[in-house]
């Protein structure tokens, strides 16, 4: 059994040249994923309520 039979190198090189592997609008997968994560973080931050005064005091005490 040869190396190329176990690991088909020629198939990998064809896929690397194909720009459709990057998906949405030719961007790497991490770019839209990062953008969606930022949107989710901001949305949750805006929809969440403010911490109570007790929590704020505990936080301030822990910073010292």
Image (cartoon, helix red, strand yellow):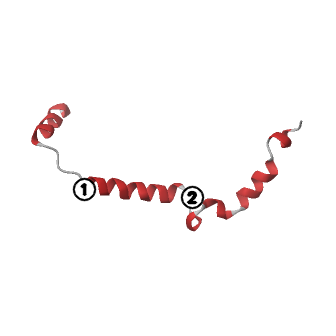
Label of residue 47 in the image:
1
Q: Quadrant of residue 35?
A: bottom left
- In the image, is 27 to the left or to the right of 17? left
Q: Badge 2: few (under 14), some or many (20 or more) residues near its Cα, within 10 Å?
A: few
Label of residue 28 in the image:
2
Where residue 51 sits in the image (x, y, percent)? 16, 45
Q: Quadrant of residue 6?
A: top right
The residue shown at (25%, 57%) is 46
Q: Badge 1: few (under 14), some or many (20 or more) residues near its Cα, within 10 Å?
A: few
The residue shown at (71%, 62%) is 18
- In the image, is 19 to the left or to the right of 46? right
Q: Quadrant of the N terminus?
A: top right
Task: Answer above or below: position of 23 versus 37.
Answer: below
The residue shown at (85%, 42%) is 5
Q: How many marks?
A: 2
Which residue is most to the right?
1
Q: Quadrant of the C terminus?
A: top left
Judging from the image, what secondary structure is the residue with disc 2 in? loop
């Amino acid at each position: 059994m040869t190396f190329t039979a176990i690991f088909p190198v020629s198939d990998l090189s064809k896929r690397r040249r194909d720009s459709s592997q990057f998906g949405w609008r030719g961007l790497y997968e991490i770019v839209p994923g990062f953008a969606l994560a930022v949107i989710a973080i901001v949305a949750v931050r805006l929809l969440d309520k403010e911490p109570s005064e007790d929590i704020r005091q505990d936080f301030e005490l822990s910073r010292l």
